Image (cartoon, grey):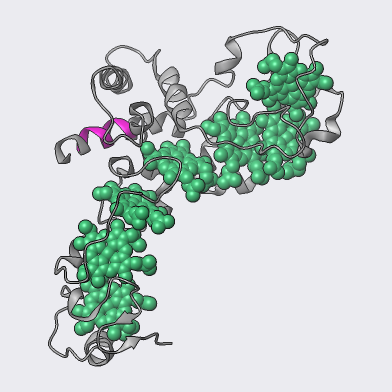
Amino acid sequence: MKRNLLIFVTLAAILSTAYAMGVLPKSATNAVSHTLHRSVNPGPLSAAHANLGDNCQACHTPVMGVDTAKCILCHANNESILQRQPTAFHASVGTCKQCHLEHQGLDANLSEMDHSLLTSIGMKAMQNAEAGTEEASAYNMLVDKLRLASPPHERISLQESVLDCASCHSNDDQHQSLFGGDCAQCHATNRWTIPEFKHPSTSSTDCNQCHQAPPSHYMMHFKMISAKVAGKPHARVEQCHQCHQTTSWNDIKRAGWYKHH
Ligand code: HEC
Ligand code: HEC
Ligand code: HEC
Ligand code: HEC
Ligand code: HEC
Ligand code: HEC
Ligand code: HEC
């Protein structure tokens, strides 16, 4: 796993660079042109867009179909999506309809994340890179990887696993970076919990391999308060198991529930 990690991250970082550089064509998927048949009524619009009613042209352009430019026209200034780490990719994504399905009715959920779509979009953006450039070799390596490799575990697809998860989710990291940035090594893309994970028993002495102590443990506070509360004046910080249970960090051996203010 270690050996692959580096390749993963290197490639993925470059894949995500495609977003950072804004090289994504603004109309990537509109290339698949199709005719809008006025006679077809595919179903009522979502509540958010219900007021657009019969104004089909608000989102559709004849021949092209759903027109990304029209979505952007109304939504370009949505600061909250552009500023949140996981949704900042909106600045350069170039297509909307795969993740924002319409005509599903008033109650339908209008936003549905599709991680593998991000990979296709990134690949498409890189495929015409000039031969000999870093981007072109990154593209070729990704193509090989997507053809030959297998996913890190069965809860994630290979297509999804080449993404640089940390570029969008480092703020969600519960592991204080101890597990690195390649979240795909262990996680799926639909939920962070891992059904088959069993936490090591409370008698484990390896707690510090997976957990980082808070800053207060490296200050006077540790000797003066924490160690005394736990009745272990000589324990070193790395020996979490001397003082902690696995139920909660505030559940202290011998002292019970403890929370200082
Ligand atoms: C708020 C934007 C919006 C409005 C307004 C809207 N549509 Fe759509 N429409 C979409 C999106 C997005 C899709 C693609 C959804 C999908 O693939 O599930 C779509 C898909 C369709 C499709 C299926 C074929 C295709 O282009 O993918 C038809 C037909 C269609 N719309 C017709 C209409 C008609 C007729 C109206 C007016 C009565 C209308 N739409 C109004 C957003 C809109
Ligand atoms: C004529 C302007 C207009 C167009 C065109 C338009 N929208 Fe909207 N959209 C709105 C308004 C107004 C709202 C509701 C207020 C808000 O949340 O900003 C909304 C809401 C949304 C929401 C949030 C829904 C929620 O859960 O609250 C999404 C996602 C969205 N639009 C995506 C799209 C996409 C994708 C397209 C193109 C297919 C599109 N919009 C076209 C005006 C527009
Ligand atoms: C790869 C999937 C994906 C693509 C492509 C995508 N979005 Fe989104 N978008 C999302 C997701 C997921 C959310 C919901 C984020 C959240 O609520 O945490 C979102 C949120 C939004 C919102 C805010 C909704 C709200 O609740 O306020 C708007 C507006 C929006 N997108 C518009 C667009 C437009 C316009 C495009 C095309 C330029 C687009 N999106 C392309 C996945 C996507
Ligand atoms: C370009 C940005 C981007 C990348 C890269 C990305 N994600 Fe996401 N991810 C999102 C967005 C947007 C959502 C929707 C929820 C939100 O807004 O936080 C999401 C949702 C998730 C969720 C569900 C969170 C929840 O609580 O519902 C998980 C789990 C997840 N991603 C894991 C991953 C993993 C693992 C990777 C790497 C293989 C990855 N993501 C790569 C943007 C991204
Ligand atoms: C070496 C494996 C590994 C890596 C790499 C990893 N995690 Fe985890 N993560 C886990 C395990 C195991 C759990 C516990 C899952 C459970 O309790 O179901 C977890 C739990 C989480 C949770 C809390 C889930 C919950 O709701 O209880 C989040 C959020 C999370 N990880 C985010 C990340 C992010 C973001 C990354 C990448 C920056 C990452 N993880 C990298 C193994 C890993
Ligand atoms: C193999 C890695 C691993 C080892 C060893 C390990 N843990 Fe964990 N532990 C995790 C992961 C992953 C989570 C879930 C993500 C998170 O909350 O950090 C977790 C969660 C916890 C939580 C819950 C945090 C919360 O607020 O919900 C506590 C408390 C905890 N561990 C204590 C311990 C103690 C004490 C030890 C040693 C006896 C230990 N752990 C050993 C991986 C490990
Ligand atoms: C000598 C005993 C002792 C050792 C060793 C120890 N802790 Fe603690 N820790 C405590 C006590 C007591 C508290 C309760 C609050 C306080 O004193 O800061 C605590 C609090 C915490 C908290 C909660 C902080 C908060 O702000 O709520 C975390 C997280 C934590 N410890 C993690 C660790 C980890 C990880 C290790 C090992 C790398 C570790 N501790 C080693 C005694 C210890």
Give whichever of 150, 215 is nearer the camera. 150
Quarter in which the C terminus is drawn: bottom left
Vertical side of 122 occupied by 175: above or below: below
Give whichever of 7, 39 is nearer the camera. 39
Q: Is residue 68 left or right of residue 233?
A: right
Q: Is residue 14 left or right of residue 70?
A: left
Vertical side of 197 occupied by 237: above or below: below
Q: Is residue 60 left or right of residue 202?
A: right
Quarter of the image for residue 228 reads: bottom left
Report the number of discs: 0
Quarter of the image for residue 247 reads: bottom left
Q: Position of residue 79 (x, y in %)?
A: 63, 46
Quarter of the image for residue 43 reads: top right
Vertical side of 135 occupied by 191: above or below: below
Please provide the residue range marked out in magenta: 6-12
- Residue 85 in view: no
Q: Position of residue 222 (x, y in %)?
A: 25, 85
Q: Is residue 131 left or right of residue 97?
A: left
Q: Is residue 7 magenta?
A: yes
- Residue 63 in view: yes
Which residue is at 63% across, 31% downward?
A: 100
Q: Position of residue 252 (x, y in %)?
A: 29, 83
Q: Position of residue 248 (x, y in %)?
A: 35, 73
Which residue is at 28% across, 87% downward?
A: 221
Which residue is at 42% across, 26% downward?
A: 119
Give whichever of 153, 18 is nearer the camera. 153
Q: Quadrant of ligand 2?
A: top right
User: Magenta stretch: dominant SS?
Assistant: helix
